[in-house]
Image: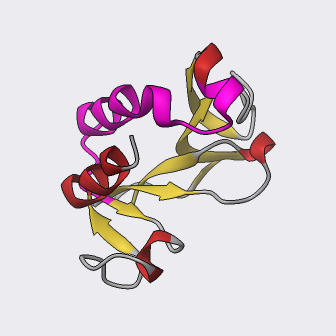
Amino acid sequence: MKYFSIDYRSPPSGMGQIIDTSLPPMIGDRHNYILVTYSGNGKEDNSYYIQTKHFSSKEAEEEGWAGPIMKEIIQFLRDQGVTHVYDSELSYDYEGSDDGMFPLERWSEIMMSYL
């Protein structure tokens, strides 16, 4: 399974990671994940991950959240073959998750409703 795990830690950590459970979690000293970041929330490159996908957006940086680029992020997740999103915080307020795991399309609907 490939899923996107939202990261609610401080902004330098990025928005979250794409995790492929069929792959080993580490390659050498790097996490075998794709880190997803955007302007104001994570660096354009992070040496702890095998890959970083950074979305540049002055609007996202000014607003302090990914809303202005959410459509692009969701499309990137689809393009990467992500099927689910782990969002522990969102699971408190919305049905459709099992222990914080949402199908990508359900999570997308929720995120787009905030726009």
Image coordinates of residue 12 in percent, x first then y, are 79, 41
Q: Residue at x 48, y 36 (%)?
A: 67
* Residue 25 occupies quadrant: bottom right
Q: Is residue 88 visible?
A: yes
Q: Residue at x 60, y 20 (%)?
A: 59
Q: Quick check: 20 left or right of 82?
A: right
* Position above or below: 43 against 11: above
Pick the residue in front: 39 or 101.
39
Query: Is residue 68 shown in magenta?
Result: yes
* Position above or below: 108 against 70: below
- Residues in magenta, as a range: 60-84
Q: Quick check: 57 left or right of 21?
A: right
* Position above or below: 77 against 105: above
Query: Is residue 108 shown in magenta?
Result: no
Image coordinates of residue 45 in percent, x first then y, are 70, 24
Pick the residue in front: 83 or 114.
114
Q: Residue at x 20, y 53 (%)?
A: 105
Pick the residue in front: 100 or 48.
100
- What coloring was used for the rendering? secondary structure
Q: Is residue 24 visible?
A: no
